[in-house]
Image (cartoon, helix red, strand yellow):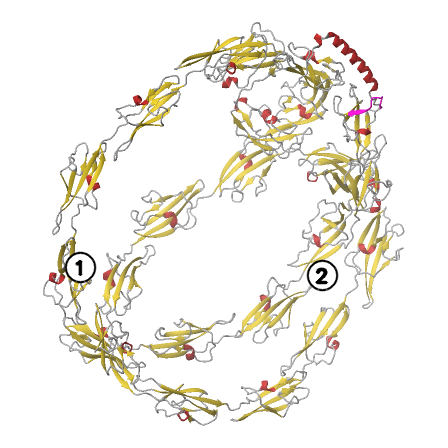
């Protein structure tokens, strides 16, 4: 339920009563509000820090806390307090009004680093006072809570966590604790040898990491160097290195100096191997075989016979030889070995010869070599077998070399076998030939089988005197061809049997024509010509099986009649060509149904079947062809006739035609109808002459063609007539458009508030009005939009006009007064103001009273109290529920201004040509903008222009209503750098050097630098050394004010031209074109010219048009010209003809394949594969059928080979084989006579007389003995051969037997060992040595021997039986042997191993050995002759082994001996143990050449004594003497020890000795400690001597340490300072001044300073103090991090001493290291509106970072842009932030500017302030002129009075009245904006004018 509203104006009594109650209430409430006595309260973070802990006095109303003075939500007492937050006290009612405020501060732990390191030489000096934590009354503990505070003097514990807390300022509490991990670094000066020696070898280079000092170290190159050396830094001999002790994060200030001495190690080279052939007689210097670079002068062990390193393979043994180079320094001796190996020489035997017949069996050539050749060699040339087997049938005679490969370095050796092969004369194989009586002469040679050689003799002799047989002269019969007397080859012969037969007759060819419909049979024989013989055969075979042709079955074609000739007479044949004449085809009868609207068509296409073309039509058609036109041609039957070819008759077919009438649906139409029209018939809207009876689609509501606009919808309606087959349906359309009758709706009313926004009257019409109508009277908007501020109340009529009539409706409009809160206002206070004001007075125009303010003010009304109320935006709202008008609001912005801040005084040093700069950047602090400068600058602003404004002090004054503030900037100038302007130079690579400075433009300053550096180190450019490119010249000034100036010189180096080198080009005269450039040698460049010019006009040469000759190629550039030539020559094209083919019989004569090639081939080509003739002559009886390629190749490779192929087909003549015989055992099974034919007979022949089997199967039980003839025929002739069949008896070889023999038995006949009754005359296999059956045990091997009985005829199978022969070998005891045993050999030896030969095992020894076997035991058995005996049934055998015992070699046992270095020589033999034999050798050899050892010359080590006896089998014996040379005592070397006067700790003088002193010596004078420890508090400075004595050798060695006490430098009065303590990262060094060091004498000092906080390092540097003053530079590389850095002086030494002054009194200084980031730009911050003419200032405004941005034209250095300079599209700008201290960003922001069109939607401001401040002084609608140039703007006041009218040509409204130009008061005004573009409706709104 909505509460009822009241107005105080209507109820004055109630108002008075309420005021009394409020006054009373205030009095009561204030009396109970809590009191805050302490408005600033503090707590510690370890206490309870809750709201309930706040302190306020409860005055009876309770205490409730709030987080703001106006908050209505109280805080809970359990809520946590927030440090720095204000809290407000109220009572329980929350109505105290002004609440008391409490500022709360919560204190936490003190501030400090959580990790702190303390670095001291003495850890006991690190105390709690060394720890740093910032806070109030800081105390340190060893526990995180509780515990007792530590004293400042308590010593710190390393690697311990300490805890610090602080007290609140009032001391009421202590905070939580800061935890700090403390590391105490103990960094005493390191100790170690001050001289350290290192051995340098090729494999080892000593580095800094090899230096030795106590503790963990850093090494430096000097006493004061700050850069530590990497451990991998190579040491330099004679260089002193300095070590510090490192205990991170601490490092000792004092340093140990170490002198590095590098000794070069001896180099014996690298191990190697030497292989020598054992036939080598040349000596080798082993030194030259060593790898690497060995030093000369070394020694070899074992010693060579030469006494040097010369190795003689004829004397020296192979093995390992060691080369040793002795060291003359601290490095050890070095050795390398050479391993010598002797390789055996190979043996290929001696040369031999071999004579063979070409048909001999294969022979191993190895057997023909002389001498004792090694196996495994290779033969050359290679034999067909791939081994040494020579096959005369495959391998050619000649010299064959046998090579045995030597193992390197031995060379290969060879021997030869000369092979002679006598060709075997082959008479071929027996043959036969049948010839026809009409044949010509034949060569009987061609009828021989096999491959007979020519040159044989025929018998009986033929009439021709040769092998030519003439059937008209020579008689048939057998002719023999033979070779006699061809040693070493045997005689050879073969026969040819000749038979003569008559020629047959098949008649002549004929033709037979038959019509395809004639099926009468015909005898083809009747169609043959001449007088053909009967009995022939037809091919292909006819169905009748005879010559009767049946047209219904047999196919047309050529039929061949063949009469078979008696071989070799060919068959005779004749052809009958049977032709079937096709009967004519007029197709099949057809009928056609057509529609009357069909067009013409071809009747031929409607005939059935496959009618032939070319026929005639009857009756004739009007077209004169077969084209039928239904509109012209009449009749319904047409006949098509095709004439027949004899003997065939004509053929015809008919077509019958039926025509059906076509129904017409008319033409398309259209009709328009209103929704209130009556029905219409769509048929009436069709065009043409449509036939009735059609249908409409989609169907209409009427079911007919009647259209009702109230029911049927507009659209396309189709009228369709249905045709009868074959006529198609026909259709047409009517497009119906239904126009909606107009509807303006019904009358309506509109009640509107006077200040309402515009309203569209259309929305107030009732019903469903159509849009698009017009309003009367017209509204100010020109549309239906009603503006209550412009349009009058009344009745507005809405009218719609259409083709269907006009309709109207009206809206009655009534306005109601609106609520008005005035216009927005503002008010400013100074932060010190206390006067209250009424915000209502700050509202503009005439606002209604009675509104409310939000947020509520402390006054509860509109009264603002600056001491209570906060700056804010306060909203005034007027509402009236009695009307329909909405609430109205206006705001007052309350601002509280701070006092002005002009910043702090600053300085600005500028380059006198620098771009302008804003002096505001030179002020320190944070100055506000908007002040004024004095004196005034030429710019009239704060922009300082060095070119126009003077140096001096400029005062910046800032004033506002709250006061005035001033600060000054002291401006000074520095000179500009000038590097000139950019230039360029072009050079040739061969030009002389030039000075690039001369190529710079302008007037550059001298003394700049070039980058990249040139080879000359100056600006001299050498084209032969320096690379082309861009070289930058840079001028830098001492002061950083002026930027470096740069200019570039672009150097181009042009290479001299290269035409390549001369070349030649040989071309085929029919080749394609070629680029002459390809004929040049070298690397020619393209782009040159040719002379003479080829026809192509380029370098492309065409062999068909361009001549031969020399063509010159020339290429030029500005650096010269280069030429080269190509000599062009042509070669003719090869022509091998075209492919061909030939068919031959194998018995045909030879032919030349060349004649079968097509075209005109060149002669002289080659055939592949090669023919037997070696030429192109093909012999069918020798050469194989196949493809033979003819190739023509020219001498020059320019023309490609030409090839053509002849395809040869060879049909073999029939081959019945050769005559054979068949002797059969009379009991044999049936056999195939074909298998008894000789040669390779063809299958498929016939046998005569015919066998009982009807085939070639002979059954000896049925078929008789006889001669059977086998005959085979084909198109190449007939062949016959006979098999003579005879019968034989069965063979008997007896039964198997066996015999046992001794190898020494006499011969026996194995026949006697057969069982049964064997036939005599058989053969034994394998053959016995006797060649008979006699077996000789001394020659023939035991085994199975087979006796075979064969009959003369092969008919009966062989009969076999075996005899198994066993031979027991005669015993073999081997041959005599010897055995020599060493007297110390304790192993058992089997005497049988000493017998030579192959003794049988199992024998006995005499005399018997102690072992009872053949094992000889030296400890039991004696030397002598031992006999070995073996026996069996075949006898006994003995052999003797003579055993001798040799005395063993004895070198004694190992020993040892010690020498003093000053001892005399001694014989090492005397130190051997045992009973060594004399005469041995020592290794390594001693200088004496004997066993005498000289300690002054010979080295300590192991020496081996060797005793050997070449006459004995005993091995050599060795023993070793270990020689030790006692070293001389070493007391080290002299050194000094500097001690500081404040040192109290004892020092071990031993550590100060140089070299490598031995321990255990004595010191003189004696020290108080009684040892070597020097106590500075007791012992005096001076020289102390250290002595070491060797009691064994009686030698003493001494060294001195000179002890000096040094005073500490006095730093009283020394202070450090820095002029400018702000350093820019990476740009400048920090210079530290030292003053007041008056107690230090003038001279050189070394200081150690540490950097802490932002940058951390410990550094050493040398300084020179003069008059108590000095300075040193901290390089920028030590200050890489931004932030505050402390510089602390930690040590100061007199240069060269190590006693540091006490530096604790010297105050550290602070350096602020500043690093600015690269600027960041907003998204799309590089895009600017083209229309805005943006400047550098606009670009800077898009930077996210606070501060000043400078823009440059380069990423480094470059020229800065002026802020007012216009931006250029596509230009790259580089931005850098600059601080108040002048530091800039190290990395500049790179941006590329883009301009974009920015005309967008209108931007209409809601207010403006015409106060002439240049900002928003006019009512400016953004983009209005661009988007709507025809606009009209009108401005009204709230009463509808027009105040301004304007268009594109008018000035913008400035807040004045158009009547009298008077200024209008602040307030809300109303505008109407008419766009006048024909599209957009007028727009109205309000704008606030603020004064």
Q: Quadrant of residue 266?
A: bottom right
Q: Residue 777 at what x, y percent from top left?
A: 48, 8
Q: Secondary structure at mark 2?
A: loop
Residue 38 bears which disc, if any?
none
- The answer to which image quadrant residue 304 occupies is bottom right
Disc 1 marks which residue?
558
Q: Is residue 1632 above or below residue 1446?
A: above
1799 vs 1583, nearest the viewer? 1799
- Which label lies toward us, 2 or 1? 1
611 to the left or right of 667? left
Q: Secondary structure at mark 1?
A: strand
Q: Main secondary structure of the magenta part?
A: loop
Q: Nearer the viewer, residue 464 or 1350?
A: 1350
Q: Is residue 1507 above or below residue 642?
A: below
Residue 1: image location, x then y, percent = 66, 18
Q: Are marks 2 and 1 in contact (CB under 8 Å)?
A: no
- State the extent of the magenta-drawn residues as a range: 57-65
Query: Which label number is shown at residue 330?
Result: 2
- Distance (Cα) linking label 2 and label 1: 116 Å
Q: Locate residue 1212, reporting x and y percent.
A: 25, 69
């Amino acid at each position: 339920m909505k509460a009822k509203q009241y107005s105080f104006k209507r109820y004055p009594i109630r108002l008075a009563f309420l005021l009394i109650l409020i006054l009373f209430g205030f009095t009561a409430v204030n009396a109970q509000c809590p009191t805050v006595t302490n408005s600033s309260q503090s707590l510690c973070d370890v206490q309870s820090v809750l709201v309930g802990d706040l302190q306020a006095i409860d005055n009876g109303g309770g205490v409730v806390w709030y987080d703001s003075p106006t908050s209505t939500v109280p805080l809970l007492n359990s809520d946590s307090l927030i440090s720095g937050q204000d809290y407000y006290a109220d009572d329980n009612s929350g109505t105290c009004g002004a609440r008391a405020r409490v500022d709360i501060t919560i204190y936490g732990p003190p501030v400090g680093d959580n990790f702190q390191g303390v670095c001291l030489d003495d850890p006991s000096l690190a105390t709690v006072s060394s720890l740093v934590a910032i806070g109030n009354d800081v105390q340190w503990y060893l526990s995180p809570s509780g515990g007792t505070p530590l004293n400042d003097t308590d010593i710190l514990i390393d690697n311990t966590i300490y805890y610090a807390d602080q007290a609140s300022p009032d001391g009421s509490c202590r905070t939580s604790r800061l935890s700090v991990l403390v590391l105490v670094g103990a960094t005493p000066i390191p100790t170690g040898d001050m001289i350290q020696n290192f051995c340098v070898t090729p494999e080892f280079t000593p580095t800094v990491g090899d230096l030795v000092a106590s503790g963990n170290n850093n090494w430096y190159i000097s006493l004061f160097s700050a850069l530590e050396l990497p451990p991998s830094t190579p040491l330099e001999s004679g260089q002193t290195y300095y070590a510090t002790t490192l205990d991170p994060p601490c490092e000792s200030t004092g340093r140990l100096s170490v002198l590095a001495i590098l000794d070069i190690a001896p180099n014996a080279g690298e191990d190697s191997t030497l292989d020598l052939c054992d036939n080598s007689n040349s000596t080798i210097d082993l030194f030259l075989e060593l790898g690497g670079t060995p030093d000369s002068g070394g020694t070899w062990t074992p010693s060579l016979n030469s006494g040097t390193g010369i190795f003689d393979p004829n004397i020296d043994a192979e093995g390992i030889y060691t080369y040793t180079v002795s060291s003359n320094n601290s490095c050890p001796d070095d050795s390398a070995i050479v391993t010598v190996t002797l390789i055996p020489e190979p043996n290929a035997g001696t040369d031999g010869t071999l004579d063979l017949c070409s048909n001999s069996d294969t022979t191993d050539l190895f057997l023909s070599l002389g001498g004792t050749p090694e196996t495994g060699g290779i033969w050359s040339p290679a034999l067909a077998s791939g081994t040494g087997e020579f096959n005369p049938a495959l391998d050619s005679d000649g010299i064959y070399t046998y090579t045995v490969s030597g193992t390197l370095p031995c060379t290969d050796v060879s021997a030869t076998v000369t092979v002679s092969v006598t060709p075997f004369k082959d008479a071929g194989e027996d043959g036969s030939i049948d010839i026809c009586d009409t044949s010509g002469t034949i060569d009987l040679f061609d009828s021989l089988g096999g491959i007979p050689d020519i040159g044989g003799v025929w018998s009986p002799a033929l009439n021709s005197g040769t092998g030519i047989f003439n059937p008209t002269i020579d008689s048939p019969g057998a002719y023999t061809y033979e070779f006699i007397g061809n040693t070493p080859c045997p005689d050879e012969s073969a026969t040819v049997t000749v038979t003569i037969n008559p020629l047959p007759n098949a008649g002549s060819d004929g033709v037979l024509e038959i019509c395809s419909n004639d099926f009468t049979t015909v005898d083809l024989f009747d169609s043959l010509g001449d007088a053909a013989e009967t009995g022939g055969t037809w091919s292909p075979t006819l169905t009748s099986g005879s010559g009767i042709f049946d047209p219904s079955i047999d196919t047309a074609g050529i039929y061949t009649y063949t009469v078979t000739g008696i071989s070799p007479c060919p068959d005779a044949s004749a052809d009958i060509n049977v032709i079937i004449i096709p009967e004519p085809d007029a197709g099949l009868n057809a009928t056609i149904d057509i529609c009357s609207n069909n067009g013409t068509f071809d009747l031929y296409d409607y005939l059935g079947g496959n009618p032939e073309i070319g026929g005639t039509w009857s009756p004739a058609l009007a077209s004169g062809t077969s084209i039928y036109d239904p509109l012209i041609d009449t009749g319904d039957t047409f006949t098509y006739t095709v004439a027949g070819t004899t003997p065939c008759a004509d053929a015809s077919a008919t077509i019958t035609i039926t025509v059906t009438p076509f129904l017409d649906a008319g033409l398309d139409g259209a009709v328009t109808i209103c929704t209130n029209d009556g029905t219409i018939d769509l048929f009436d809207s069709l065009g043409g002459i449509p036939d009735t009876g059609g249908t409409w689609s989609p169907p209409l509501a009427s079911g007919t063609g009647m259209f009702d606009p109230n029911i049927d919808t507009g659209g396309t309606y189709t009228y369709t007539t249905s045709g009868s087959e074959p006529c198609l349906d026909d259709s047409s359309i009517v497009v119906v458009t239904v126009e909606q009758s107009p509807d303006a709706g019904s009358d309506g009313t509109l009640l509107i508030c006077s200040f309402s926004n515009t309203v569209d009257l259309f929305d107030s019409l009732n019903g469903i009005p159509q849009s698009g109508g017009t309003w009367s009277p017209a509204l100010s908007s020109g549309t239906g939009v009603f503006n209550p501020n412009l349009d009058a109340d009344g009745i507005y009529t809405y009218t719609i006009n259409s083709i269907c009539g006009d309709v109207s409706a009206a809206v009655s409009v009534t306005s109601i007064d609106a609520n008005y809160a005035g216009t927005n206002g503002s008010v400013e206070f100074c932060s010190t103001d206390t006067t209250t004001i009424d915000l209502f007075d700050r509202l503009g125009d005439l606002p209604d009273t009675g509104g409310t303010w939000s947020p509520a003010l402390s006054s509860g009304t509109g009264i603002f109290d600056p001491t209570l109320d906060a700056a804010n935006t306060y909203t005034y709202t007027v509402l009236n529920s009695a009307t329909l008008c909405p609430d109205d609001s206006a705001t007052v912005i309350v601002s509280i201004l701070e006092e002005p801040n002009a910043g702090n005084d600053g300085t600005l040093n500028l380059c006198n040509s620098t771009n302008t700069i804003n002096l505001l950047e030179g002020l320190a602090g944070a100055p506000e903008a908007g002040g004024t400068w004095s004196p005034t600058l030429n710019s009239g602003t704060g922009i300082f222009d060095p070119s126009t404004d003077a140096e001096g002090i400029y005062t910046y004054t800032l004033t506002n209503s709250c006061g005035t503030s001033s600060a000054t900037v002291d401006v000074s100038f520095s000179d500009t750098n000038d590097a000139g302007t950019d230039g360029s130079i072009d050079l040739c690579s061969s030009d002389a050097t030039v000075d690039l400075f001369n190529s710079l433009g302008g007037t550059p300053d001298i003394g700049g630098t070039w980058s990249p550096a040139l080879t000359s180190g100056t600006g001299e450019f050498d084209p032969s050394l320096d690379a082309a490119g861009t070289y930058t010249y840079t001028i830098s000034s001492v002061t950083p004010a002026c930027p470096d100036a740069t200019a570039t010189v672009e150097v181009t180096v042009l290479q001299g031209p290269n035409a390549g080198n001369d070349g030649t080009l040989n071309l085929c005269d029919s080749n394609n074109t070629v680029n002459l450039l390809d004929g040049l040698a070298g690397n020619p460049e393209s782009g040159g010219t040719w002379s003479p010019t080829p026809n192509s006009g380029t370098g492309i040469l065409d062999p068909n048009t361009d001549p031969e000759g020399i063509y010159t190629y020339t290429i030029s550039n500005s650096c010269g010209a280069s030429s080269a030539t190509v000599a062009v020559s042509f070669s003719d094209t090869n022509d091998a003809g075209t492919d061909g083919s030939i068919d031959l019989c194998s018995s045909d004569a030879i032919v030349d394949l060349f004649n079968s090639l097509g075209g005109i081939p060149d002669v002289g080509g080659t055939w592949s594969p090669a023919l037997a003739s070696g030429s192109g002559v093909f012999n069918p009886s020798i050469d194989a059928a196949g493809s033979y390629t003819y190739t023509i190749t020219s001498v020059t490779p320019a023309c490609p080979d030409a090839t053509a192929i002849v395809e040869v087909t060879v049909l073999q003549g029939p081959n019945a084989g050769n005559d054979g015989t068949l002797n059969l055992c009379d009991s044999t099974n049936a056999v195939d006579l074909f298998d008894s034919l000789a040669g390779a007979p063809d299958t498929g022949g016939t046998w005569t007389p015919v066998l009982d089997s009807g085939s070639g199967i002979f059954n000896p039980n049925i078929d008789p003995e006889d001669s059977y003839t086998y005959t085979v025929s084909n198109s190449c002739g007939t062949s016959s051969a006979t098999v003579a069949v005879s019968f034989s008896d069965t063979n008997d070889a007896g039964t198997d037997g066996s015999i046992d023999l001794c190898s020494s038995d006499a011969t026996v006949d194995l026949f006697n060992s057969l069982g049964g009754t064997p036939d005599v005359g058989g053969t034994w296999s394998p053959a016995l040595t006797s060649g008979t059956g006699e077996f000789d045990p001394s020659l023939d091997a035991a085994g199975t021997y087979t006796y075979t009985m064969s009959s003369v005829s092969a008919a009966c199978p062989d009969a076999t039986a075996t005899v198994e022969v066993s031979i027991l070998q005669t015993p073999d005891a081997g041959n005599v042997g010897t055995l020599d045993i060493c007297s110390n050999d304790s192993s058992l030896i089997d005497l049988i191993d000493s017998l030579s030969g192959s003794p049988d095992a199992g024998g006995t020894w005499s005399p018997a050995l102690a072992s009872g076997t053949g094992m000889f035991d030296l400890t039991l058995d004696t030397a002598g002759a031992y006999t070995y005996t073996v026996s069996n049934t075949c006898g006994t055998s003995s052999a003797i082994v003579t055993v001798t015992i040799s005395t063993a070699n004895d070198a004694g046992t190992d020993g040892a001996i010690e020498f003093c270095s000053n001892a005399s020589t001694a014989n090492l033999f005397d130190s051997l143990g045992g009973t060594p034999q004399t005469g041995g050798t020592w290794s390594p050899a001693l200088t004496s050449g004997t066993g005498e050892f000289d300690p002054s010359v010979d080295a300590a080590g192991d020496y081996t004594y060797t005793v050997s006896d070449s006459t004995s089998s005993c091995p050599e014996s060795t023993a070793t003497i270990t020689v030790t040379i006692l070293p001389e005592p070493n007391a080290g070397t002299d050194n000094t020890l500097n001690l500081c006067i404040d040192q109290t700790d004892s020092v071990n003088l031993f550590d100060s000795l140089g070299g490598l002193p031995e321990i255990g010596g004595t010191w003189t004078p004696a020290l108080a400690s009684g040892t070597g420890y020097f106590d500075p508090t007791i012992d005096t400075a001076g020289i102390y001597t250290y002595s070491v004595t060797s009691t064994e050798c009686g030698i003493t060695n001494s060294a001195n340490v000179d002890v000096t006490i040094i005073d500490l430098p006095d730093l009283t009065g020394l202070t450090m300072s820095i002029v400018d303590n702000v350093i820019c990262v990476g740009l400048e060094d920090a210079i530290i001044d030292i003053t007041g060091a008056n107690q230090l004498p003038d001279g050189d000092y070394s200081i150690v300073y540490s950097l802490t906080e932002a940058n951390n390092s410990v550094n050493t540097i040398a300084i020179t103090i003069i008059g108590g003053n000095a300075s040193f530079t901290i390089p920028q590389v030590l200050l890489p991090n931004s932030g505050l850095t402390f510089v602390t002086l930690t040590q100061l030494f007199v240069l060269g001493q190590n006693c540091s002054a006490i530096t604790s009194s010297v105050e550290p200084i602070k350096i602020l290291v500043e690093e600015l980031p690269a600027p960041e730009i907003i998204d799309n911050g590089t895009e600017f509106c083209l229309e805005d003419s943006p400047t550098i200032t606009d670009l800077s405004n898009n930077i996210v970072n606070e501060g000043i941005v400078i823009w440059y034209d380069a990423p480094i250095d470059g020229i800065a842009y002026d802020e007012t300079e216009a931006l250029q599209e596509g230009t790259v700008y580089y931005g850098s932030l600059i601080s108040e201290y002048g530091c800039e960003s190290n990395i500049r922001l790179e941006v590329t500017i883009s301009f974009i069109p920015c005309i967008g939607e209108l931007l209409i401001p809601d207010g403006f302030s015409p106060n002439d401040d240049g900002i928003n002084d006019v009512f400016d609608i953004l983009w209005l002129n661009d988007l709507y140039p025809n606009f009209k703007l009108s401005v009204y006041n709230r009463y509808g009075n027009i105040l301004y009218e304007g268009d594109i040509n008018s000035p913008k409204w400035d807040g004045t009245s158009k009547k009298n130009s008077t200024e209008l008061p602040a307030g809300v005004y109303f505008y109407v904006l008419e766009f006048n573009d024909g599209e957009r409706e007028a727009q109205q709104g309000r704008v606030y004018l603020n004064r």
